[in-house]
Amino acid sequence: MSTPQHLILVTHDQEGHATGLLPAEADAPQLSVLDASATRGDGVFETISVGSGHPQALDAHLDRFARSARMLDLPEPDAGLWGDAVHAIAEALAGHEEAWVKTVISRGIEGGSTPTGWAYGSVSPDFRRERTEGVAVALLDRGLRSDVAETAPWLLAGAKTLSYAVNKAAVREAQRRGADDALFVSSDGLLLEGPTSTLIVLHDRALVTPPAALGILPGTTQHDLFGAARDWGLDARVDVLRPDDLRAAESAWLVSSLRLAAPIRAVDGAATPVDAGLTAAMNGFLRSRRS
Ligand code: PLP
């Protein structure tokens, strides 16, 4: 991501209630070295796309921010104040067709009870190549069974926590294998999600995505695409998928808020079909969202 240009601190009291917004210098030091975000990755975040000043899927992002916070026993984020912070940064970026705002809340200074919150944003990188040429993916074992969310909720599978070191390591491993991105598979053989994206597969005129109950993040981009599927004459459903389903798919995508729909062009080195027309329609729809 590019250098942050706009920053707003979301201040909190010791009870964990948000108390206000404080615009701050993005280039100046703001975070204590004792903050749990830095020392333990103990917090949650959201990344929201902004199209010409309009935050996209903001309500869904704020709902998921609250869901992640609950999973970590953090105080409930104040949707009103966080929404105001996102809108203020989005407005400052209104001159750009594609930008982003990230919201972060951590457990705060170690030993204290005051969460640390901030929102910042900048201009998005250029994703045209990924959106048109597509991405090659490597299937990587996540090492967790598909029932992990139920049997081991303390592993926080499906929460958007600040601890993305594993997700980043997975992308590096995928690159070592000659791919662009990773696609996680559960230890019992079900397709899950990318390190920063949701899987959608086209099969028999239906868009299919794996259930969030497998311990994956419920995607806001996937949700919006499923809402528009009928416009493209497609059904949409949530279902378990296996690697062979992906290899046999008519087309497949990794979708996410900033990169949008990146068609999968190869799986473990074997080429897979890309539907350029449908991909363009998806990305046109996603980019035109005004809320
Ligand atoms: N899954 C993971 C693990 C993610 O980190 C992300 C986004 O960063 C997604 C899925 C896609 O979610 P969204 O479409 O809401 O950006």
Image (spheres, rainbow, N blue to C red):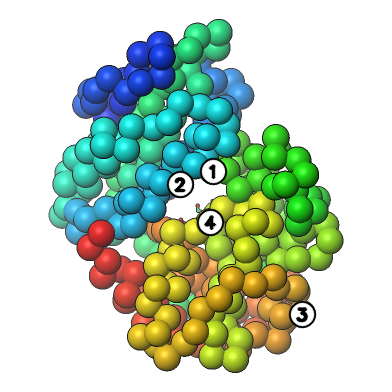
Give the SS element for disc 1: loop
The image shows residue 260, relative to residue 58, as above or below, that is below
Quarter where residue 121 is shown:
top left
Q: Are marks 1 and 2 in contact (CB under 8 Å)?
A: yes
Which label sits on residue 244?
Answer: 3
Q: Are marks 1 and 4 in contact (CB under 8 Å)?
A: no
Work out whether mark 3 precedes mark 2 in sequence or the reverse, and give the earlier one: 2
Q: Position of residue 180 (x, y in %)?
A: 61, 64
Work out whether mark 1 precedes mark 3 in sequence or the reverse, and give the earlier one: 1
CA–CA distance in space, label 1 to label 3 = 28 Å
Quarter where residue 240 is shown:
bottom right
- Label 3 or label 2, whichever lies nearer to me, is 2
The image shows residue 89, relative to residue 41, as above or below, that is below
Give the SS element for disc 4: loop
The image shows residue 74, relative to residue 44, as above or below, that is above
The image shows residue 225, relative to residue 276, as above or below, that is above
CA–CA distance in space, label 3 to label 2 = 31 Å
The residue shown at (27%, 20%) is: 19
Find disc 1 in the rendering and name its residue: 160
Q: Are marks 2 and 4 in contact (CB under 8 Å)?
A: yes
Work out whether mark 1 precedes mark 4 in sequence or the reverse, and give the earlier one: 1
CA–CA distance in space, label 2 to label 4 = 8 Å
Work out whether mark 1 precedes mark 2 in sequence or the reverse, and give the earlier one: 2
